[in-house]
Image: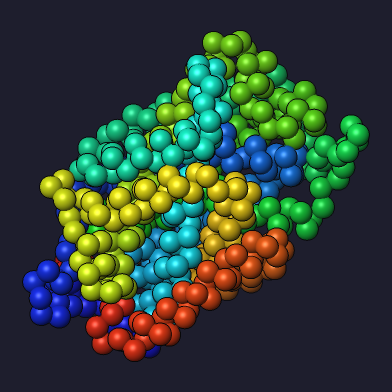
Amino acid sequence: MTDTLRPAEAAAPGHPSDSPRQLKRSIGVVGGTLLTLSCVTPASTLFVVVPDLFGTLGTATALTIAIGSLLCIAVAFCYAELGTLIPSAGGEYAMVSTLAGRLTGWLVFVLSLLVVMIVPPVIAMGTADYLAPVVHLDPSLTGAAVMLLATLAGLLDLRANAWITGIFLVLEVIAAAVVAVLGFVHGHRGLGSLVSMQVAGAHGHTDTVTGVLVVSGLAIALFVTQGFSTAVYLSEELEHPRRDVARTVLATLAISTVIILVPVAAITLGATDIEQLTGGDLSSMVTAWSNSAVGTFVSLCVALAIVNAGIVMVIQNSRVLFASARDKAWPTPVNRLFSKLGRFGSPWVATLAVGVPGALFCFVDLDTLYGVTGVSVTAMYLLVAVAALLGRRDAHRNTPAWRMPLWPALPVLLIGVLAYVLTQQDVGHLLWTGGITAVATLYWALYLRPRAATHWLVSLPEDTRP
């Protein structure tokens, strides 16, 4: 069963507090792009996530990220079209529920919830490494503190957060630019090394990276630029969502790809040997290429970028939980709590509900968090591509929206590639994600489906209904 988009107030079942609340439209495309770029958090992704890819893929890291970025163009087209067609703070689940059915939308919601709960602590735990030139801190405790700070900032007005994150974003772009310049200036190998597929092996030997390993690394490579979807979550607070969602999605992907991929190429060329590259200690590389003062400056910029990312991710994630409560995903008392708006117009209970558990996740094994996130992102993108195939049916055919080129070829190609990427992931990570999805399916079958008339009713704000 596919839900029909409804006016926001039409969904009220009778109690005033059950009426769907609407977020305030307060930002334009520039503010939305700043917030979305901050959620991609290019510099903190470069310094926190990419070093692990260097450890696995060596010189093939830049190539893997480039392939992932090309795939993300097709993904971004799907998000841009569906986000303007169905501009809801629910993001993926609202789009997929409306176009591919309520159960499929519920599974996408669970996958997106996994991503939004795990990604912030993954990034936050990198803060301690980049504060090391100034003070030595425990990574888990520092990550938890960053998550709590981000949660407090997330309670503020969205316009205020756009300015805060914009300032931090400038600093992280400067840090990425410094690394890129230093890496290219101190290059130890030619451009051909970017596709040489080498990684450090045992006993000082150099091993060859296989094509299968590159494919398995694509799940994390997709995660590297994943934050462009934030534009969809912010669609209810953009002043002109039918126009600005697509602009924000596509602009963010283009800018973030450059900010991440160029320094990755520079680091690959500038590393003195494969062992140093595979070690992934970017702070030491920067210091060796310059001096301790420059190294400290870059490290502090990255630490601020991580705090910035935490703020934006908490903002994004609270909107997802807010929208799920508005659409009656939970028992009535829980729905009322998560849909409450504070004095600054932010969903304050939902903000606390995503921020505080995020602090606790900072004490979970990092490899498990990476793996589950990669699988969840890949599966979520696949289901969004399925919805994109269905986005021009029936009543939605003539709805004002940005339309992707090369439809339906791009969604079909994307589905095939992403399905193959999933088959190459670690079995343990697939089992973790599959187990959580199975529990969610039981919740759907036992609680949501019997209450289909009153629960999981995807709605749109009044001013964006067809």
Q: Position of residue 158 (x, y in %)?
A: 23, 44
Residue in the foreground of this view, choosing between 450 and 284 = 450
Q: Residue at x 58, y 25 (%)?
A: 179
Q: Residue at x 44, y 54 (%)?
A: 117
Residue in the foreground of this view, choosing between 363 and 453 = 363
Residue in the foreground of this view, choosing between 406 and 439 = 439
Residue 245 visible in image: no
Task: State the image quarter where residue 189 is shown.
Answer: top right
- Image quarter where the C terminus lies is bottom left
**Is 73 on the left-hand or right-hand side of 212?**
left
44 relative to 218, above or below? above
Q: Residue at x 26, y 87 (%)?
A: 453
Q: Position of residue 64 (x, y in %)?
A: 68, 48
107 relative to 58, above or below? below
Residue 383 visible in image: yes
Task: State the image quarter where residue 84 is shown.
Answer: bottom left
Residue in the foreground of this view, choosing between 456 and 185 = 456
- Image quarter where the N terminus lies is bottom left
Q: Position of residue 194 (x, y in %)?
A: 74, 38
**Is 66 on the left-hand or right-hand side of 134?**
right
Q: Position of residue 310 (x, y in %)?
A: 40, 41
Q: Residue at x 52, y 64 (%)?
A: 381
Count of picture labels: 0
Task: State the image quarter where residue 333 is shown.
Answer: bottom left
